[in-house]
Image (cartoon, coloured by chain):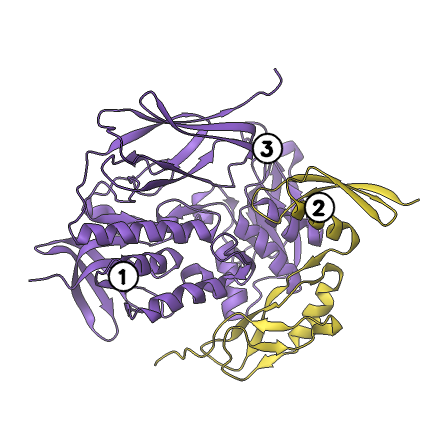
Amino acid sequence: MKPHCDVMVIGAGPAGLAAAVAAHDQGVRVCLVEREARPGGILKQCIHDGFGILRYESKLSGPEYAQCELEQVIDRGIEIFPETFLLSLGRGKTGFELTLQNRWQGVFTLTAAALVAATGCRERTGRQILLHGTRPAGVYTAGTVQRLINIDGYLPGRRCVILGSGDIGLIMARRLVLEGAEVVGVYEIRDEPSGLTRNLVQCLDDYGIPLHLSTTVTRLHGEKRLEGVTVCPVDAENRPDPARAQYLPCDTLVLSVGLIPENEILEPLGVELDRATGGALVDQTLMTNVPGVFSCGNALHVSDLVDHVSESGEIAGRWAATHARRVRRIGASQPIALEGELLYLVPQRLDPQAKGPVNAWFRSRRTLRQARLEVWAGERRLLERTYPLVRPPEMERIVFDLDGQAWAGQRFRVILREVRSGG
Amino acid sequence: MDERTRALVCIECPQGCCLAAKQHGDEVKVTGNRCPRGLEYARRELVNPCRTLTTTVRTTFRDYPRLPVRTAGEIPLARVFEAMAAIRGVVVDRRVQSGEVIIPDLIGTGVALIATGDLSHQEEG
């Protein structure tokens, strides 16, 4: 029996939409499963602009970007299962077996020769950071605030404190001010902001919202509704200094304290994760250690630009199709050793047999001025690039080529170092 | 003569050049930019900073209570709250599509407010 489709894409956000299109264009049968009613993923609530600077060379809003991507899926007649929840994932006789549930078909099973996990990420919540005190209403993640305001049309509070300087937090600071709420300030435990420069300028500076670095929220106050928070400067080891603690009255605390790739559904298949990214360990085809299972988008590693998400979707979709058609010979992939100031690099492995240029994305551990990145295969340097400025919040992308070389047995290394100019 | 220096971070592209812009009367001198866009950016920021405004408007539809909108071009940053006040009064009662004009001339800026979401997709059930 033939599987229901060649490539099953899980999640119809930007990564999944791009993966579905790329797989379809390789001539295979593609299915897209989405748990929400409308495709587009988180872009639906990201009404701000700045999407598609690389991919469409214009600053679109999130819904517009999603629409552009969705139209390509619809034009190709790719099968979408909306409002369909993936219950479990396993192996069957003809490939992977997905147990799904929706209100029209109940619980049902579909089979696929290859899988693309485009399941995105979720926000770190108040439970995952140390917040003392009471547990009142009024503590939200930034994404929840974004949904309440932009989709549902509710203002969640009047006087807000924002903890964490991640991009969604900065964007919601501006959004809250535009909608008439007061934003007391953004508090960041680290000594540098974690959002993009563009957002620091256009969300905070434009509206005179103060950013307090090396400061965190240590306690919540209030019984039913939040009445205030204690903010406290921290030392170099992130230890709060109680002598300098300050009480701030507020009715809302917005948390923008990080995003975590969502990969639980892949666990039963034995997919290995990278502790640095929280996503799967992949080779340059974005295939995980389980042959036929691919990962892309924010499920693979959290990106700051949707353009990178779409690109990784395309790569995963294209190679998933190649896998389903059984035209790829999987080589013995080798790990890439990271040296210097790299926080992470995706992919983590290279398959010397996979044809075509290698796309890779990396982040630095800390802010570097004048940095040099090198990619080595054995004694040969495949790429060298210098950067005037590398910041952990701003992901960098590189492309290099392995083609036509016998790399078997060679050691792959990627090095990022600060260059001291002029001695 | 009016002379002031401002430190700016260029946000025209993800490179984020650190600019120093010096205004000397009508003339703006810029250093730190790696391309002409940085020069333009600094000039605009000093003379009349403009932004694309993105927000939502109310609708009469239960499945889409808010319609995302944006200005088709940039409007002066100084007039953003005035624009928000005008947008707050709008209620959309048509199943508009992305790109449709919601307000043709937003508070006399000559810039239109356009839908960025699509209400034509109706939810079942």
Distance (Cα) linking label 1 and label 3: 52 Å
Mark nearer the viewer, 1 or 3:
1
Residue position for label 3: A234
Is residue A373 visible in the rendered structure shown here?
Answer: yes
Colour assignment, chain A: purple
Distance (Cα) linking label 3 and label 2: 39 Å
Question: Hey, which quadrant is residue B115 in on the image?
Answer: bottom right
Residue position for label 2: B39
Which residue occupies the foreground of this view, A420 or A95?
Answer: A420
Chain in yellow in the render: B
Q: Position of residue A321 (x, y in %)?
A: 23, 54
* Neighbours of disc 3 within 10 Å: few (<14), some (14-19), many (20+): many
Tell me the subunit letter for badge 3.
Answer: A
- Residue type pointed to by label 2: Leu
- For the residues beneath circles 2 and 1, the answer to whether they share a chain is no
* Labels 1 and 3: the sequence-earlier one: 1
Q: Do callouts 3 and 2 mark residues in contact (Cβ within 8 Å)? A: no
Residue position for label 1: A24
Q: Quadrant of the C terminus of chain A?
A: top right
Q: Residue at x 47, y 45 (%)?
A: A258
Mark nearer the viewer, 3 or 2:
2
Q: Position of residue A399 (x, y in %)?
A: 40, 39
